Image: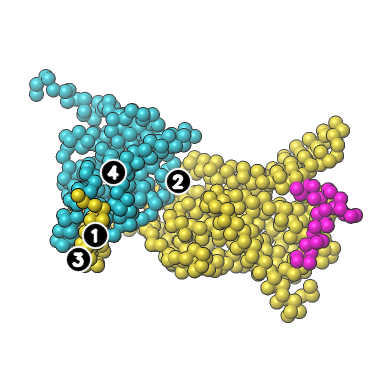
Chain colours: A yellow, B cyan
Amino acid sequence: MTTADDVLTKAEALRNSLPSSFRDEMVQSLYTEAERIAHRAVKTSSNRTYDLDQRIDRLVTAPVTGLLVMLLLLTVVIWMTVSGANVFSDMLFTVLFGFGDWARARFVEWGVPWWITGFIWDGVYRSLAWVVAVMFPPMAIFFPAFTLLEDLGYLPRVAFNLDWLFKKAGAHGKQSLTMMMGFGCNAAGVIATRVIDSPRERLIAILTNNFVPCNGRFPTLIMLATVFVAAGFGGVMASFIAAGAVVTVVLIGVAFTFAMSWILSKTVLKGEASAFTLELPPYRRPNVLRILYTSLIDRTIFVLWRAMLTAAPAGAVIWLLANIPFGNASLAIAIAQWLDGFGRLLGLDGAILLAYIIAIPANEIVVPTMMMIYTNAGMMVEAPADESAIRALLVDQQGWTLLTAINLMLFSLLHNPCATTIITIFKETGSYKWAAMSVIITLGTAFLVTFLTASVVRLAGLIPA
Amino acid sequence: MTSGTTDPCATCPMHARLEQMGIRMNDYDRVVALAGNPNTGKSTLFNALTGLKQHTGNWPGKTVTRAEGGYQFNGVKYKLVDLPGTYSLLSTSQDEEVARDFLLFGQPDCTIVVTDATALERNLNLVLQVLEITDKVVVAVNLIDEARRKGIEVDTRTLSRDLGVPAVPIVARSGEGIITLLSTVADVIEGRIATHPLRVKGTPAFQKAVQELAPLIERLAPGIPNARWLAIRLLEGDARVQRAIRSGELADIVAQQRTVEDRQSSTIAVMGRQ
């Protein structure tokens, strides 16, 4: 009778009798054999060796040009997204808010109590319409563009180029792809981490994805950079300074991604970077219909649906806070005042913090909520279109300084993921713990960094604050 | 030829009949596994045979779990199991585990290894590893059109002879060579084509160790397929195979693999309908 132990003991003994390198030798002989057989069966016409694929690859995967190509493509995609989305967003705003106004007018006409009309149309509907109008167009541009690069076969090359860098942080080269996806939407970036096999490295990619600003945060960053950072400069110089400020913020985000990945891989997610084979697939002609299907149905609609699910209740909360009287103002203002001390400590203020708390469904509605609190309006309102009007409101009335603007940019970059992303992290990891971790890590970093910059600026007396 | 034999025309490519059966595969006669490196057109072939729309893409790692579908060829119903694309079966990534568990314990009647004609050498690493596990293998050399454009010619006859299993050139996208592939698969299953898979031998000491260990495994779990392969894994200290041995449930794994298979069929069936 042979028992399991017999087999295992025997295997152990035999293993010890073999030289320790036998496994490597096995793999080696496998490769040698494959090479030999392939050599016999495959004939290559020598003049075609350097075909187009290889020539492109020499450009795209070389250390310097590869990085340049990647940055160029990423810039073009983000630029297309941010500028192209404006047009469609305006159209959606006109349609959705036009309908909202019309329906609201009907409610007034029918004599529906003001608080029901307000709750439904100024609260829930307004928040929903706002989220759709600002989220849908950029995603409908970014995701197809990104999927096009994927279908062409370009994305694996990016992972290949950057793997050495991620390896140093104990992370996976494919994290670069999930980060790029994060520029479009962090929730989509979190889903994209499925391409990472190792659970440890996948968690690192999930937990740090939010340090990449999604396109919901770009308008805020651009507005702050234009109105505040580039304020003292004129003409062309101003737009360069503004663009430089946004790029700096993005680079800070990337730096934090690496730092946090490194910290995680040395602490809670300890381990070596896994070895992986990354195939550089041949460049292929993209399939346009499939690109549209994958990017619009699988990604855009999927993310938008989750965002709408959280936007509706948040719209209700935002409206209630703005319309429930407290003392001689609204509950929102009372809470903002109560948070003000802590906000000032971070170089921000109470209204900003409150806006970040109640506008959690989507980064896109943070500024409208902030404006609502500042102007004591009963619903979310758009920031003034005119630069001097923004300055008048924020600097003259609310006492913003350059520090407030810079810290708000930093806070926007580093703060907790939006509700849509948190839900997605929970769904992907299946764990409350990791979803909570993602909030703690980012929020902790945001508090720490803004507190430090505010303290340094104040101690140095650079800006009166 | 006497008149009593079957009509030879029935099996020639002109008259062969392929019927896509999508997710209808309740009473299949044969199980065929589809293995291959990522991005070799494996899913394209799967879709062409079954008529399903398994998500494909120019990106490694699209197939997360096994997808299953059915096709009927010359009156025989086949269940086709699309395994995750992997580069090897040696490491412990989830994809590779799914693929090798199925090859090992699912006991498919035949395994098609889809290879990329433009990168045959790299693809052969996996082919050789599959040959270690199972005898009934057909190598599909895909993307020969792309290879031709690049000035690469693959001599499938030499390849067949060296590997000891049939190699069939195909273009999964256009359907070229698919009928030949399917009749070759049928021939391998029915024993009309005998296979003598190439096994990488390794050093004499290693060979001796395998020969000593394999009979022990067969005695422990009578009827276990691929005892030789299990022996190699044990010599390498593979923790998963060790666990399977220790729990004494090797036979159970064979049974379990069958149930998983049934359960997954219904999951995929739902996904396929979307």
**Badges 2 and 3: C-beta atoms under 8 Å apart?**
no
Residue extending farthest left: B1
Q: CA distance from mark 1 to mark 3?
A: 12 Å
* Front tag of 2 and 3: 3
Q: Are marks 2 and 1 on the same chain?
A: yes
- Nearest to the observer: residue A166 or residue A48: A166
Q: Which element carries disc 4, helix, strand or loop?
A: helix
Q: CA distance from mark 3 to mark 4?
A: 29 Å
Q: Which element carries disc 2, helix, strand or loop?
A: loop
Residue extending farthest top: B3
Q: Is residue A239 left or right of residue A187?
A: right
Magenta range is: A317-343
Residue A241 visible here? no
Pointer 4: what residue?
A: B251
Chain identity of mark 2: A
- Nearest to the observer: residue A206 or residue A140: A206
Q: CA distance from mark 2 to mark 1?
A: 55 Å
Secondary structure mainly formed by the magenta segment: helix
Chain identity of mark 4: B
Pointer 2: what residue?
A: A286
Q: CA distance from mark 4 to mark 1?
A: 20 Å
* Front tag of 1 and 3: 1
In this view, A207 is above or below B25:
below
In this view, A297 is above or below A376:
above
Q: Which element carries disc 3, helix, strand or loop?
A: helix
Image-quadrant location for residue B169: top left
* Front tag of 2 and 1: 1
Pointer 1: what residue?
A: A9
- Pick whichever of labels 1 and 3 is earlier in the sequence: 1
Within 10 Å of disc 3 (Cα), the crowding (few <14, some 14-19, many 20+) is few
Pointer 3: what residue?
A: A17
